[in-house]
């Protein structure tokens, strides 16, 4: 059993190690760690070259987790993801050949380039944490986590993710270009000899293992949410269903996600209770991909974050 202060200390050490590799992106790192604590999946949207892959690889090394990268393409088949059965000439029998999904942290690069059939292969994995191959069920890693990326600039040859798939992501994180000072630091690290493809030479410390990560995930149970905060969470989500600019609001999974994510923020801060500020800290990444704007709102240039910001301003904050 790991105590809440120990979780906070471990996360602080993890962030210090991550800074050896990643410049800036503190918010992105916090959300990925929060998702790991609550066994959630993450959709990362950003232009190329913003260290999305490098961030995930760095975190996997620090927690001693397995890492696999899937590059999605239009011709990728479901069996390329989950695996298939192959005929063994020596034994004369068919055996299961497991796919790359059988790891701890899975980076699905440019998920929207895969066709719907292949995207759907991830549904069972993400929701049930299991894979079925030729009628045989296999459990995935206890800390199994999908981190998918998509490029917001190129839509030719892509397949938009359906709402059912989007709802399985705990967070949708938006990554923009770094600040000028941060970009300078990136070049200075490059000048000093750092190379992203030589991560093993950075000297990252392995601070945990799968069992320790599982213990941190269990520690979330010690974080309590008072009835007033629960009312605040449901009030926010329910208002999205009647908001004038929204065609579709958040469902029950949105409420659960907002509740869990708020607990993760409190745990990372070393507290055993949730505050309204914890809820506000995660409402945008939890909700932005679970609501749909009306066409007229989109024409006016309103974004999901704009709508959520207005909604937060309308719901009374509990004391």
Image (cartoon, rainbow, N blue to C red):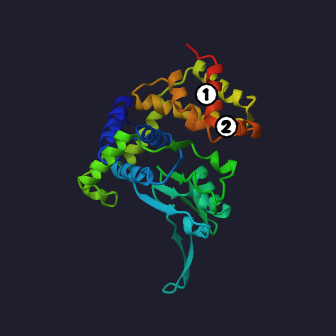
Residue under the point 42% across and 41% down:
29
Q: How many marks on residues?
A: 2
Q: Nearer the viewer, residue 149 or 136?
A: 149
* Direction from residue 150 to residue 200 in the image, left or right: left
Q: Considering depth in this image, is 190 or 111 the residue closer to the camera?
A: 190
First in residue order: circle 1 vs circle 2: 2
Q: Report which quarter residue 285 is drawn in.
A: top right
| Quadrant (top left/top right/bottom left/bottom right) for the N terminus | top left
Q: Position of residue 16 (x, y in %)?
A: 30, 40
From the viewer's perspective, tell me whether residue 44 is left or right of residue 188: right
Badge 1 density bin: few <14, some 14–19, many ≥20, Cα 10 Å: some
Q: Residue at x 48, y 23 (%)?
A: 273
Residue 179 image offset from top left, x and y in percent: 40, 40
Residue that badge 2 annotates: 301
Q: Quadrant of the C terminus?
A: top right
- Identify the element where label 2 is drawn: loop
Task: Return the x and y of residue 83 as percentages of the image width and height.
Answer: 55, 68
Question: How far is mark 1 from mark 2, CA to CA?
Answer: 14 Å
Which disc, if any, is residue 309? 1
User: Residue 133 at what x, y percent from top left?
Assistant: 60, 67
Q: Residue furthest top?
A: 319
**Residue at image location 75% in from the left, 38% down from the top:** 294
Classed neighbour count for the residue bearing mark 2: other residues with Cα under 10 Å, few (<14), some (14–19), many (≥20): few
Q: Quadrant of residue 84?
A: bottom right
Q: Nearer the viewer, mark 1 or mark 2?
A: 2
Secondary structure of the residue carrying numbered label 1:
helix
């Amino acid at each position: 059993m790991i105590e809440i202060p120990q979780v906070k200390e471990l996360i602080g050490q993890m962030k210090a190690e991550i800074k050896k590799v990643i410049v800036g992106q503190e918010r992105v790192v916090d959300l990925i760690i929060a998702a790991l604590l609550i066994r959630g999946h993450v959709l990362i949207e950003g232009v190329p070259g913003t260290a999305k892959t490098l961030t995930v690889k760095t975190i996997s090394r620090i927690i001693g987790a397995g890492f696999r990268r899937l590059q999605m393409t239009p011709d990728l088949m479901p069996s390329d993801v989950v695996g298939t059965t192959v005929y063994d000439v020596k034994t004369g029998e068919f055996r299961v050949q497991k796919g790359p999904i059988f790891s701890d942290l899975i980076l699905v690069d440019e998920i929207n380039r895969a066709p719907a059939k292949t995207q759907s292969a991830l549904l069972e994995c993400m929701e049930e944490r299991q894979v079925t191959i030729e009628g045989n069920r296999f459990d995935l890693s206890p800390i199994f986590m999908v981190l998918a990326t998509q490029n917001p600039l190129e839509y030719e040859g892509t397949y938009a993710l359906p709402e059912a798939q989007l709802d399985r992501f705990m967070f949708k994180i938006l990554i923009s270009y770094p600040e000028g000072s941060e970009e300078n630091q990136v070049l200075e690290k490059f000048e000093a000899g750092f190379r992203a493809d030589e991560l093993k030479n950075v000297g990252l410390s392995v601070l945990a293992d799968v069992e320790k990560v599982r213990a941190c995930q269990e520690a979330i149970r010690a974080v309590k949410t008072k009835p007033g905060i629960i009312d605040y969470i449901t009030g926010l989500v329910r208002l999205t269903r009647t908001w004038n600019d929204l065609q579709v609001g958040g469902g029950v999974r949105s409420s659960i996600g907002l509740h869990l994510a708020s607990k993760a923020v409190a745990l990372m801060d070393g507290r055993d209770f949730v505050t309204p500020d914890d809820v506000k800290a995660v409402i945008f990444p939890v909700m932005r991909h679970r609501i749909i704007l009306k066409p007229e709102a989109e024409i006016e240039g309103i974004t999901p974050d704009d709508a959520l910001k207005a909604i937060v301003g309308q719901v009374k904050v509990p004391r």
